């Protein structure tokens, strides 16, 4: 997560009540260019912690307050949490702890905040080729097809998709300008073959205003449409979400040979480590490619011949005692186990 420069609060701020300080900090975040989701996350973290400690003055907050808050959330979860499993709670605590630390740093208050282990990142789920085909075959109208094509060929986030305007499209250069990207940074994605065909058909039928949205849906409308599409395709609806289609795009792009840095630019990741998670998802493909192309350093017939020669040497050097049946060296005159004389 990129660090936002919020500077330092005036020294007299520590005398204000905690609710006022939280609001001032949120205002500073917004003024520093933090996006809406980041501001919302900071507010949720600060509100949850200070609710737990009864909105005590920031100068009175102790290490034990953080510790007890952490224990309570790990045991009983967060109010209104979606999933409720320990891994989700650890992930939330990990980020909330970072936000709290930034808040107290901003105030100039040196206080130890217990570290929370970051849960190991899960491999993102992706769709198989046959599942993608089923989704397209189950499309009921042009809009279904366009949504699938855009998400699977550009890797756009849901919010980015829903904010696309016709003025952002350049069919001639096959580029889409993503203006409302995460971190308020613009980037360009490439228009794939299917998306190009669909957009060309659409623009041939009607002339659209440059500020008119390409996908005229709310996030809830997009989410429900994809779930409905999954049901018609006979796919578990829990496997179909906008971000899973983004994961699928990224994995397919790597499979088809795109380099990791180019993929980072297309996805709009600030940190290459975020993009590298998709490399772990290609283990099976790497294994299959290895078995298909790599036959080993030693040729198989040579190896068999070598194994046979070992077997023959073993047979030539080892004899069985005719009296006790034990293996004895080929040049032995007496059996070392029963003492019998060996006839040559």
Image (cartoon, helix red, strand yellow):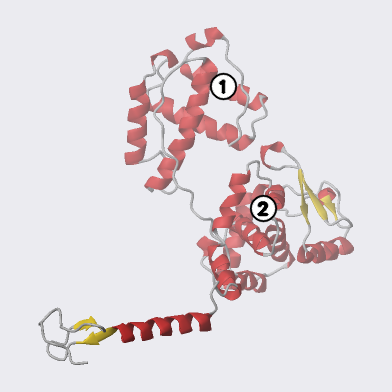
Residue lying at 58% horizontally and 69% vertically, measured from the top left? 128
Asked whether residue 118 is in view, the answer is: yes
Q: Residues within 10 Å of mark 2 (few under 14, many from 20)?
A: some
Image height check: is 325 above or below 161?
A: below
Image height check: is 243 above or below 145?
A: above
Q: Position of residue 251 (x, y in %)?
A: 62, 60
Give the image quarter of residue 40.
Answer: top right
Q: How many marks?
A: 2
Q: Nearer the viewer, mark 1 or mark 2?
A: 2
Seen from the viewer's position, the closer of residues 311 and 137 is 311
The circle on residue 260 is 2
Seen from the viewer's position, the closer of residues 190 and 45 is 190
Give the image quarter of residue 332.
Answer: bottom left
Residue lying at 63% horizontally and 35% vertically, measured from the top left? 36
Q: Position of residue 189 (x, y in %)?
A: 76, 52
Asked whether, in this view, residue 190 is left or right of residue 27, the answer is right
Residue lying at 49% horizontally and 49% vertically, measured from the top left? 121
Residue lying at 62% horizontally and 49% vertically, measured from the top left? 275
Q: Position of residue 311 (x, y in %)?
A: 37, 84
Image height check: is 169 above or below 225?
A: above
The circle on residue 84 is none
Give the image quarter of residue 114.
Answer: top left
Image quarter hosting the C terminus: bottom left
Seen from the viewer's position, the closer of residues 272 and 79 is 272
Q: Residues within 10 Å of mark 1 (few under 14, many from 20)?
A: many
Seen from the viewer's position, the closer of residues 264 and 341 is 341
Asked whether, in this view, residue 105 is left or right of residue 222, the answer is left
> To which residue does mark 1 refer?
25
Image quarter hosting the N terminus: top right
- What whole-number distance in Å separates the C-alpha atoms at marks 1 and 2? 37 Å
């Amino acid at each position: 997560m990129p660090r936002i420069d919020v500077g330092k609060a005036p020294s007299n701020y520590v005398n204000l009540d905690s609710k006022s300080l939280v609001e001032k900090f949120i205002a500073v975040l917004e003024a520093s260019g933090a996006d809406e989701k980041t501001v919302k996350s900071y507010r949720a973290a600060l509100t949850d912690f200070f609710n737990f400690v009864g909105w005590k003055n920031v100068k009175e907050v102790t290490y034990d307050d953080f510790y007890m808050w952490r224990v309570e959330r790990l045991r009983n979860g967060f109010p209104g949490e979606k999933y409720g499993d320990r891994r989700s709670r650890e992930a939330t605590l990990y980020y909330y702890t970072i936000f709290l630390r930034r808040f107290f740093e901003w105030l100039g208050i040196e206080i130890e905040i217990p570290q929370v282990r970051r849960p190991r990142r899960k491999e993102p789920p992706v769709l198989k080729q046959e599942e993608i085909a089923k989704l397209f075959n189950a499309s009921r109208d042009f809009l279904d097809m366009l949504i699938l094509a855009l998400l699977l060929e550009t890797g756009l986030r849901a919010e980015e998709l829903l904010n696309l305007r016709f003025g952002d499209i350049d069919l001639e250069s096959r580029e889409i300008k993503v203006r409302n990207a995460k971190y308020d940074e613009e980037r360009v994605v490439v228009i794939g073959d299917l998306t190009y065909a669909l957009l060309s058909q659409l623009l041939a039928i009607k002339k659209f205003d440059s500020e008119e949205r390409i996908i005229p849906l709310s996030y809830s409308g997009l989410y429900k449409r994809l779930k409905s599409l999954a049901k018609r395709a006979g796919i578990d609806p829990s496997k179909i979400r906008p971000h899973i289609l983004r994961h699928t795009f990224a994995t397919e792009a790597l499979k088809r040979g795109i380099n990791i840095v180019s993929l980072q630019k297309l996805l709009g990741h600030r940190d290459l480590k975020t993009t590298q998670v998709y490399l772990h998802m290609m283990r099976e493909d790497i294994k299959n490619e290895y078995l298909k192309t790599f036959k080993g350093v030693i040729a198989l017939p040579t190896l068999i011949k070598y194994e046979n020669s070992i077997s023959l040497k073993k047979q030539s050097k080892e004899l069985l005692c005719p009296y006790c049946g034990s293996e004895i060296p080929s040049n032995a005159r007496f059996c070392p186990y029963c003492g019998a004389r060996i006839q040559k």
